[in-house]
Amino acid sequence: MTDPSSSLLAQLMEYQKHSVVPMHMPGHKRNTQSAPYLAALGAPYDITEIEGFDNLHHPGGILKHGMERAARLWGCDHSFFLVGGSTCGILAGIRAATQYGDSILLGRNCHQSVYHAIEICGLRPHFLLPPMDDTFGIFGSLSPEQVAQALEQHPDVSLIVLTSPTYDGVLTDVTSICDLAHARGIPVLVDAAHGAHLGFSPGFPSSAVQDGADLVIQSLHKTLPSLTQTAIAHVNGTRIPCSAFSQELRMFETSSPSYLLLSSIDGCIRLLEESSSLFENWESLLANFNQQMYQLRHLQIFGYGTDQEKSHPAVFRFDPSKILILTDGTPYTGPLLMDRLRRDCGIELEMASAHYALAMTGLLTTKDHMDCLAAALWGLDQNGQTTISHPAPRRNATLPRQIAIPGAVRPLPHHSVRADEAVGHMIGEYVWVYPPGVPLLIPGEQLDAAMLEHLASLQTQGVAIQSTSGNAPGHFEIIDNSNGFHHGGKMK
Ligand SMILES: Cc1ncc(COP(=O)(O)O)c(C=O)c1O
């Protein structure tokens, strides 16, 4: 029998000592003698849902206790452990909150999993374009005013999806948008994949759970000490029923969850319960880094050193765990800076765009890590006399015309044509810039000359354009007879 007071890993270790004959999955049978590579991967503790270890999709024992502990920690009604990343939580959450064919309201800068949910659920998306931050050329925050106006135009939306914080670290005013939505009985789902660490200490903004969202999805693995793929979902109230969410998770999440992943979720939650000093340490590392960054003369870091958060009016709040380094006015582009840090300083960044690069810190970032980054940035900054200017590529200020919903278009026959021939036609694929992977075109939208020009200018500035077919921006998949398209999935 398992003991809910001891960690899942401790119990797996205890279980392993009993040498029970494993006539069940997984196929490795904990036989690390014959497959030595499995020993270092934790195979001795890699079990399936056997007696005493509960069932992720019908929790009633140790996993249920763990989820209840998580709900208390985050201050919500119910928490769900996820082993398919935030991706599976977003797919399940959107499906749980909508009926096939419903309208939803969302920022254009959402993750591909949200677009995939729109497609699978046959939803009618009403996109809002967040304002741009002029200095860094990143998406700012959707404003409550934008949402209020959109709700006037589309009073029938059954869900609002917000991304807060974004990959870049930009937060949205979730509280005000929830107030607007809830006054109309509309639930709010927040993709907080990058915000699992929020709300635990005064140095970081509040979490979307505290801000009143109905369903919040967080990747534990992005900022907290938990294995890759682990995530958590938090439900508050009944606008998105727990039972519906848990039912949908069965559709989007494996029926064979890894106990290694589940143990890391359990361990992470226990660490958060016990160690508030870890947050204090993180905050003080960032405060120290802030002091060091005042000495930069060329590189600019969002919200650090001389760059003040309040000088970015398009941004509601910024997550200080993200170190966003602007390379405009230096000899570097984002990818060049990333490359120099890798080659000369042994530092691997999270990503680089044409004119900035992103360093991500986490709860277990050490003083050595931060000192190393600070010293490397100083070093590069010293060499950074302003010789070359790389203007920030600006994203398209308007949204493409949406002719039909993605779910109706994707199954239709399509064919590849040259870019100039594709202008005016309905596109049958996703086209996005990488990073951060935000789609510029989705199935059902019309390619126009302005978009083609925009893609070309992004490409000139070194931004990678990707598409479902892999052929954009030279060629695009267009829907056969797209000019005479007649289908039930037309946008209203
Ligand atoms: C904004 C956002 N949402 C969702 C996800 C998906 O998270 P996961 O990789 O945990 O599935 C990501 C991944 O990078 C993301 O950036």
Image (tube, grey):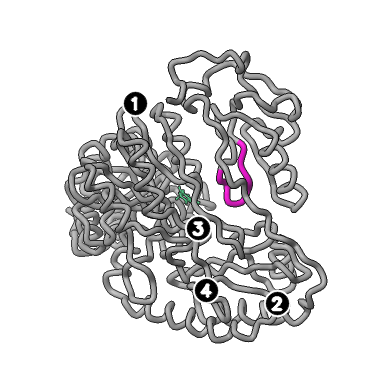
Q: Earlier in the sequence, mark 2 or mark 4?
A: 2
Instruction: Indicate left or right for 188 with 380 as reference.
Output: left
Q: Is residue 42 visible?
A: no
- Of residue 475 and residue 314, the one placed in the foreground of this image is 314
Label 2: few (<14), some or many (≥20) within 10 Å? many
Q: Earlier in the sequence, mark 2 or mark 1?
A: 1
Task: Find numbered disc 4 in the image and state the secondary structure of the residue it sits on.
Answer: loop
Residue position for label 3 = 140
Amino acid type at circle 4 is Gly
**Real-space Cα distance between discs 1 and 4?**
42 Å
| Eye-nearest disc, 4 or 3 | 3
Q: Earlier in the sequence, mark 3 or mark 2?
A: 3
**Real-space Cα distance between discs 2 and 4?**
15 Å
Residue position for label 4 = 303
Task: Find numbered disc 2 in the image and state the secondary structure of the residue it sits on.
Answer: loop
**Real-space Cα distance between discs 2 and 1?**
51 Å
Q: Residue at x 31, y 77 (%)?
A: 276
Q: Earlier in the sequence, mark 1 or mark 4?
A: 1
Residue 435 painted magenta:
yes
Q: Give the magenta part as a residue range.
A: 431-438
Quick one: quadrant of the C terminus? top left
Q: Residue at x 62, y 33 (%)?
A: 468
Q: For residue 298, which numbered disc appears in the image?
A: 2
Amino acid type at circle 2 is His
Reply above or below: 463 against 252. below
Q: Earlier in the sequence, mark 1 or mark 3?
A: 1
Q: Residue at x 21, y 45 (%)?
A: 59
Task: Find numbered disc 1 in the image and state the secondary structure of the residue it sits on.
Answer: loop
